[in-house]
Amino acid sequence: MNKFIQLTIATVLCTTSLTFAQAPPLGTAASFALFTTAGAITNTGISQVTGNIGLETGAITGFGNVNGNLYSGGLPATAASADVFIAYTFLDNAIPTSFLASPLGNGDTLSGGIYSVFGNTTISDTLFLDGLADPSSVFIMQVEGPLSSTASTQVVLLNGAQACNVFWKVEGLLSLASLTSMKGTLIANNAAIDMASGVTLEGRALTTAGAITLNNALIYTPVGCNSPYLTGPPAPVMGSAGCYVLFSADGPVTNFGISSATGDIGTNVGLTTGYDPLLVTGTIHPIPDGSTSACATDLLVAHTNLDILAHDIELLYPAQFGNDLVLTPHTYLLNAATALTDTVTLNGQGNADAVFVFKINGALSTATFAKVVLTNGTQAKNVFWKVEGAANLSDSTQFKGTIIVNNGAITTATGVLLEGRAMTTTGALSTSAITATMPGDCSIPLPIEWLSFNGRYSNGAAVLDWRIANSGLAKFVIERSADGNNFLVLGTIEKAAAGQQQASQYGYTDDQPLALGYYRIIKIEQDGTRSYSAVVKILSPLANNNVATVSPNPVNREMNVVLRDGLTSENNELKLYNMTGLEVLHIDLKETRNSLNIELPNGIYLYRILHNNEVVQSGKVIVKH
């Protein structure tokens, strides 16, 4: 090994002019945030580390979850040890372009170059490194003795300077005082590296031999300078499942309280109940149908795609997941039940297409107010959580990404904000006063035989039209629903020329439409095979949330409800619900102008105005005495 290292060093030195600053070859050491050839690496408190941690001999202790892999010996550590020595030798042999004296910093500014400092050296206050608008500028600091910083020292990069092009070679103990903000790759020769509480290092801490200690530190390997561009794994193909926000392939889907959702909701085995169509932008599938069958199939495919992905990084402490952990685009393995506490941040590093996959071999739970935060381009549509067990999102959790549970129940408690999907292959799914938003766009086309299906309100009627590519059609059945859940047959259309192959246009007019109606078409083949269209929603002018004025808002004790023209003063009702979905007031609106006495506790309430038992307007009112 030593002959190999010496030969490599000789090659580098003989082929490279070192009279100006050039970055050393880091090799495999580039992936390490912390590394020592010999000595312990010890953490105290909660430190956040992005990059590998490794050593050839010694022990790694005190760390929670790390955004990287831990290597205690083995081939990766052996290779990194050799590469650290090569990089150190490269820096040690560089010819200085300037000579400095301690202390460094105190507002000084340096441009790119090779700087030599003799003896025991201190950095104080602020040191500026100015790239002079050249992002390739390299800064090499040759410290011929120990290096230390004073508390709250900052190394600041200006005008394009990059941490990946900053290098510190230190001949002795490297000690960073509390709250120091350091930039660059630190390489200590035969000496320890000590980082006090609250140190931030954008770079690496490497030593040829010596212990490394840190305490509540933030350390992350720098990006740029040909570092790997992280994209994460390929995203699974969701197919028709991408149109759903809440789904169980086998189990009931039930809501309690006032929940709102964007995306389809349904189950392929069981019933979907408790969701208010006025608060769902999408289709509620109360019973299994063709759409839920396709979703169940595509969900299994998506789960399989995630299941076979090889992981890049194993997070070793699933029960401590979160705690301000910052992660980058990778496939992560959590090999036990996982509990999210506080915050986990998913950093896309400027890549809007970056994909994050979490493979959890156990249940997933969150603490109250836990958060998944997306930053630097990360999008919820590119985050996936594969859970081999139940999933339970506690009160007021803010969660991002698609949760795919395999053979387990999903429970979301009051106040959960889900930007993603909650889906299970087998198990009950329950929600309670949540907000769920399907990420991205649902661009699944109609089945090939359904070319189009549209609906509109015209001259007091609901007008439907659709085109299909015929294939032995027997007839169409037109169905209508008042709530998006329970459909009744309106009529049928027999096919005039069964078996023709060209596309055909069809239409149907509902002369007595509901104020708010949901329509779908069942296509029945001659052999009895059925397929369903999408569901279209048609609003009459009465259902445009413009049939009455409700004032004042906030309400003290008197609320005025004025019915507008076009709505008779018969068969009208007002209902108020609290935020748990409990009806707390029911009043008949017998006049065009209604003054109502509201004796309710302070709070936010949902109101509905009904005409002939149909909801024609809804909204929220605040009661404040």
Image (cartoon, rainbow, N blue to C red):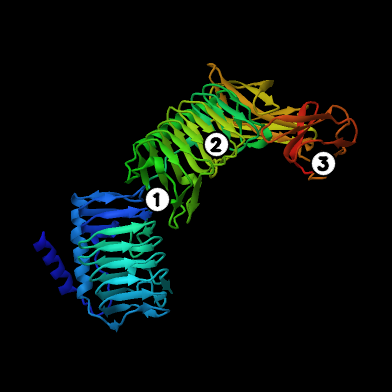
Q: Is residue 294 left or right of residue 22?
A: right
Whether residue 340 appears in this view of the structure is: yes
Name the kind of residue labelled 1 in the image.
Pro
Name which quarter of the figure residue 406 lies in.
top left
322 in relation to 116, above or below: above
Pointers 2 and 3 in contact (C-beta within 8 Å): no
- Residue name at image x 18 percent, y 54 percent: 78
Mark 1 crowdedness (10 Å alpha carbons): few <14, some 14-19, many ≥20: many
212 in relation to 421, above or below: below
> Which residue is identified by label 2?
245
Q: Which of pointers 3 and 1 lies earlier in the amino acid sequence?
A: 1
Quote the CA–CA distance across marks 2 and 3.
Answer: 32 Å
Q: Position of residue 75 (x, y in %)?
A: 18, 51
Q: Nearer the viewer, residue 285 or 329?
A: 329
Quote the CA–CA distance across marks 2 and 1.
Answer: 23 Å
- Residue name at image x 60 percent, y 24 percent: 522
> Which residue is identified by label 1?
329
> Which residue is identified by label 3?
550
Name the kind of residue labelled 3 in the image.
Val
Q: Position of residue 557 (x, y in %)?
A: 84, 40
